[in-house]
Amino acid sequence: MYTQQLQDYLAEIARLAEMRPEDVRLLDESLSCYLSIISRSMNGVLTPAVDLLETSLHLMALSIGVTEIDQNVGADGSHYLVAMGMEQTGELLARIYGKKIAEIHLPLENDYWYRLALAFLHYMAGGFRVQAVSALRHLDQIAREIQSTEFKPRYESAAKALWTMFSGKSLRTLVNPIDFYLFGEQEPSDVQGLRIYRLAQIIRRKRQSALSDLGMDNESDWLYRRGIRLAEGDLFWRNYLEKLESRGFTNFTNEQSGPGFDAWLTPESNLLVLLPTGSGKTLIAELKTALSLAQGHQVVWMLPTRSLVRQTKRELSIALSSLGVDVEELPSTEDFIPLFANHLPDQRIVAATTPEKISALLRNNPDAVSHVNLVVLDEAQILFDNRGTTAEYVLQEIHRLSPNCKFILMSAFDDYRERFENFVFRLLGQMPTNLTSDIRPTRRINGIITNYSEGAVFRPMISVYPSGLQSEQIPTQNRFEILFSQQSFQNRPGPTELAKSAAAALIGSEIRAVMFVGTVASTEVQANNIAQESQHAAELPETDLARLQTELGRNSAIELPSVGRVAPHHAGLTPLEQHTVEKWSLHKIINLVVATQSLAQGVNLPFDVSIVSFLKQTNLVTRQQENVPVSTVMNMLGRAGRAGQVSDGLCLVAMPTYQGNSLVTLNRAKRYFFRAHQASQDFLGLAKLLKAATDAQINDPDWLFQLDQIEFAQTQTLITFSLNAGMAGDQILQGIRERLLLYPSVQDLVGLEELDSVIVSLASDVEPLVRNIFEASNGDRNLIAVMARTGMPLEIIRFFLAALQSGFDPRNVSAEQTLVWADDVVSQALQLVSARQWYSGLMENIDLQRMMSSISLWRTGAPVVEIEREFRLSTQERKNRIDVGRFLNHKISLIAQFWGALAVCDEILFPGNEVRRPFEPFQTFVREGVNSTLTLEWLNRLGGLDRVLAHRLSSITPIENLPSDSRSLSNYIRRRINRWKDNSEIIPVDLNNQEVAALRSVLDE
């Protein structure tokens, strides 16, 4: 159930405490206690049960024994097991009852508080910082929630002392008993105090000298050994280490340290970081980022989704902004024209973005990356999906343009290890330094939700694997079961009914859960059904409700179920609604989220339980039911447990009982939890695209116009690659061959000895496409140049070029009139190609004129409800709302590219005429829903979620003496927001009450 490491720890305890291995029942005992608390919260009954008092006595005895053992023999694993037991028997109880007990008892008289304190100290004594901070945060939460004026200061003081211990510092003044236990010089006489004192002594004696290893107090020599000799670099690194210490990073896990900082934290190292979710990948990349910044370079972080870009930007801003580093989010969709200047600023900057954005920047101005010294690709497994070509293109191009740039590839998918290593070697010519491990910092407790029978009545139950190692091939004989005798089904339940029964049982408890369902519509249906049966009510923050009302112009679909403490989360909700669900879950306003698998893609929330309700899904191409990939199921289950917040995650798959036997069903489910490691053989990057292109017969002249059998975004990448490669030399075929050789994914297709024949074959497939473009363009160099930049359909580009040459001069009209003209040109061009297959696939039966009218509303700041009324995609109200939401969240980014292509056409036709650049921001305006740079800056500074509020603030912003350049304008708006945050009384009176409340919701974040 856990890992081999825990088995080793058991043997270690047996050796240190002179126990026989068969006498060590700690794992099952503490697991049983944990499940018993879960069961009690769900009104279920656990079998077999264990006595909490007996387990506590075992833990206390073992705690004493481990603390007394001579530390020279090393008892880190023993400390971990004791801490785990203390946490599993105490954390949930502390969450449920800790505040109530704290109202009438001091910390050391509060058993729940004391268990967590011991868990924290044992984790620290063993060097397990991530687990320690989780326990510490729960202790801190108790102190914050206490209402009693008598005991609250004592809990706050105790929390402060423990945080001080965590940070590696000492209290100057010792006031309370816990202060003396942790930092005093004399042994206490009482048993509790003595145990805390001795653990504190072990922590101080064993504390890893991580910050010293990073050069603290010796920054100049440390950097000098790495070839960094900048005086300002010394100061920056010193300030960064001080900031790191203040954030509590005073030691590192073995996974983070790897072979040692001297081995990988150097300017010349490339890294492959393959660690499970929550293992601290981000901190590893942050350290490398800080080292590059100390050298005076810029850094680019690439992430696959906009939500991850924003999340990473927030985290990096906390770490680096106070050090004078500019942390920016570059627009995260397929822009052809960068939002900012055509170069990254020549200063310390970290840009968080997607591969598509950097790809656009490279096409528009390759010199933009001249100062970039480090590229971090997070969620690097995207190399194996449909966006892998763009990611590979960016890495290859940056390496070509900036040969000294270093790279970090990070992923939680260990299956790709060998493929990643080969990829980096073929890209850079050298193997990366590996920081890899399969040890999770959080513990997964795996099981199923199934059913049992009592006569003709079916009842739900949870069946959980016991502790110890599990194998897919070896059947499990014993298990824990939670029976729900108060729930019943008249008919044999399906997976959804089983999942709902378990999820609904958690409503009203302190346990937070996510339930995954197979479709977007089902998230709302199931959330509302569960909420209607809920006996518990949540008080939703008025400012958040005002914020939703301002953006939507109506009540949100998340409001009604959230009152019942459950909310849906899916791709058809606006980003603000998704953000609000995540915020309310984090703040314990709701405790159940019903989501699609999109929530499993990197969003980190502290869920205790993850429930997967579906194991089959509809293939959108064949319309056939097929099994959900095991990796997808595991990724959904992995949302339970969050390093530093929730150490234990209960991972459950809903499976009706097979052959009437729950044990057989439990063993059949093993393939989802305990599959053997399998090296991936998937194509990646450009190779994946070329394989699809060969199947699509791209050498057919008609394919250039139909662009069928390949997704629209893929056709763009294929066209830009083919043209740029084909025009690279005197001969088309030779140019394509030379460019193909640069791509690791192509080299990965076969052994190197056969590479020449593969290159010849692939080039032979691509060459006809290039020749077809040349022939169809009739030698129009401008048309070819725009296609090479944008990859857009030839007929669209031809129409745009003709329209721009028809005599329209933007210098003679207003910006608003220019935008209207551009809308008309885009609309006419799309109407012209409405019979093409690529158009049908892109538009999906969308009415063109309604779409254009809706885009106009979107851009002028209309609430979402007005767009939904205009843009009818379905006669059914809920489906229309969801479909419009998905369009605005995703499809509009693709549609906006037509305005971007028009801007590129203008640039190609009128080079060097900077006055003629009114079209440049239009793509961003369409995508983001704004109509001016001022509104766009307001939207960015508000966090990118509050489009309507951004329009309103823009409308009341005095235009006199506004800065003209985007960076100064951004700083101006940031200063205004900071002043409002410091003093809400000076918020402009022009805003109505709802808008003021919405703004306060933003400011509170």
Image (cartoon, helix red, strand yellow):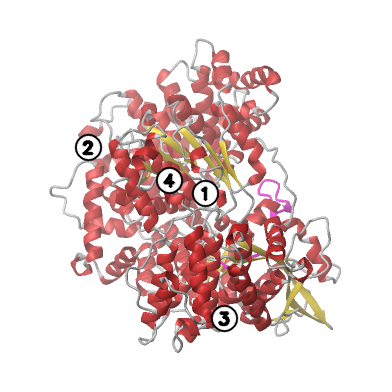
Query: Is residue 621 magenta-colored?
Result: yes
Closer to the N terminus: mark 2 or mark 3? 3
| Residue 231 higher or lower than 495, as above or below | above
Q: Which mark is residue 534?
A: 3
Front one among 194 and 651: 194
The location of residue 654, given as percent across then percent down, is 71, 66
Q: Which residues are magenta?
A: 607-629
Identify the image quadrant of the C terminus: bottom left
> Label 3 amino acid?
Ser
Is the C-beta separation of discs 3 and 4 under 8 Å? no
Q: Is residue 770 left or right of residue 930?
A: right
In this rendering, which labeled residue sits more in front, label 3 or label 4? 4
> Label 1 amino acid?
Lys
Closer to the N terminus: mark 3 or mark 1? 1
| Residue 903 higher or lower than 322, as above or below | above
Circle 1 — which element?
helix
* Residue located beneath label 2 in the image: 813
Closer to the N terminus: mark 1 or mark 2? 1
Marks 2 and 4 sit apart, C-alpha to C-alpha, by 59 Å
Closer to the N terminus: mark 3 or mark 4? 4
Q: Is residue 52 left or right of residue 176?
A: right
Crowd tier of the residue under label 4, counting other residues whose Cα lies within 10 Å: few below 14, some 14–19, many 20 or above? some
Specify the quadrant of the image occupied by residue 468: bottom right
Front one among 181 and 404: 181
Crowd tier of the residue under label 2, counting other residues whose Cα lies within 10 Å: few below 14, some 14–19, many 20 or above? few
Q: Which mark is residue 180?
A: none
Total labels: the figure holds 4
In this rendering, which labeled residue sits more in front, label 3 or label 1? 1
Q: Residue at position x 23%, y 63% from top?
A: 980
| Residue 515 is at least partly visible in this image | no
